[in-house]
Amino acid sequence: MTGKSKTKQRIFTIFFMFTVSAFFIGILSFVYLFTKSTVVRNESLFLKKSVLYTAQIEVIDSPVEIERVYKEKVEEIKDADGNIQYYSVVADDGATVAVFQSSGQGLWGVIKGHVGLKSDLETIAGIDFTVQTETPGLGARITEQWFKEQFRGKKGELKRVPEGTKSGNEDEFDAITGATVTSKAVESMINKTVKNAPAVAGKGVEQ
Amino acid sequence: MTSKAGKITLANLGRENPVFAQILGICSTLAVTNVLENTAVMCAGLIFTTALSNTTVSILRKWIPSRIRMMVSTLIIAFYVILVDIVLKAYLPDISRQLGAYIGLIITNCIIMGRAEAFALNNKPGLSFVDGLTSGLGYGYVLLIIAFFRELLGSGTIWGFTVLGDWWVKWSIMVMAPGAFFMLAVFIWIVKGLILVDPEVKK
């Protein structure tokens, strides 16, 4: 093979890679831009649903309904920079529930979620998780109903007890067997929120 | 053509099965099989990606310079995986949230790369599609069988529904990574020992 055709081949190789990349990336960019607004809306709906669930407000799972109930019952309390400090939610029984954002370090990554406290800032109205990458079947079971529902009415700060204890004590919750790190993270998420709540919610009232 | 496609199908589901014969795609076999539902979606994603990436590689096979063929294959595979990811995020947000990192894991599945390299680069698009599809199916049914037993023994549930009552002591190890190794080994042992007996050994 002569030197000239070798050069030609090399140029073709580079040209080919560029063209193929540009073609596929072009399609992806188009699909991404096309679906971007839907993805953003899904994300916002998901957060709103989570806030409502945390405050124990039942809502039909339809976008219109979630937006309507959220608008009616939830007030976003923001700090001077426009970041959401907490959500002030009017629960079904008329009382106000403060829903805080909280996060903790799980086994594989950060766990984020909402912790709702009743007006005494001690009694837990509810808890929900929005971001978690725990082991499916073990740590990821924190997103199951039985786990989340057990917190309603408990009083912080909380202690872990083994799974299946079904503890009636108001300062204990059932951890998940085989997922100690995850359970610890949830414990710290709640206790941190209860500890910081007066400071955060107090600041909100002043504004 | 039809008989060729049939032969490929039979091989991919049986004697040349990607998981228990070629021992490919083990990463995801170990990672996702502790819950049946996740396994099913993972398999669907993989079948989609192998079938279409195989077809695309095959269509382009005459122009792909051989020294960059792996780069091009990876690009095509990544393209389909990202496509699945975006579409799930937009239209099936709940499933997308549950699967999280698993979708991205499809890219690294050796089966897809293996089929592109070993089959699609040398065969026509139609056959490559059949090969990709059946390789995915061969992977899928093995994973579903493993996931069935892991979820049943580890959590006492099937597809999230409780089947074994409170009397059942859950084998937590089945849900964790070691359980996958045991389960996969037992599966391969059974299949190779009873069904796919090597004719040479039999003599």
Image (spheres, coloured by chain):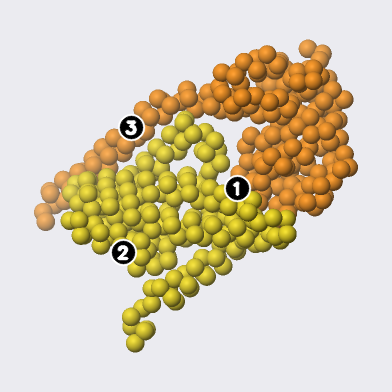
Chain colours: A orange, B yellow
Percent of width and height locating residue B95: 52, 39
Which of the two residues, A154 or B106, is positioned nearer the viewer here? A154
Residue marked by disc 1: B160
Determine the secondary structure under disc 2: helix
Residues indicated by labels 2 and 1 sit on the same polypeptide chain:
yes
Is disc 2 in contact with disc 1, using a CB cutoff of under 8 Å?
A: no
Q: Residue at x 52, y 70 (%)?
A: B186
On what subunit does the disc labeled 3 rest? Answer: A
Q: Is residue A157 left or right of residue A142?
A: right
- Camera-side mark, 3 or 2: 2
Residues indicated by labels 1 and 3 sit on the same polypeptide chain:
no
Checking the image for residue A27, the label placed there is 3
Determine the secondary structure under disc 3: helix
Q: Residue at x 82, y 25 (%)?
A: A118
- In the image, what residue type sits under mark 2? Ala
Checking the image for residue B11, the label placed there is 2
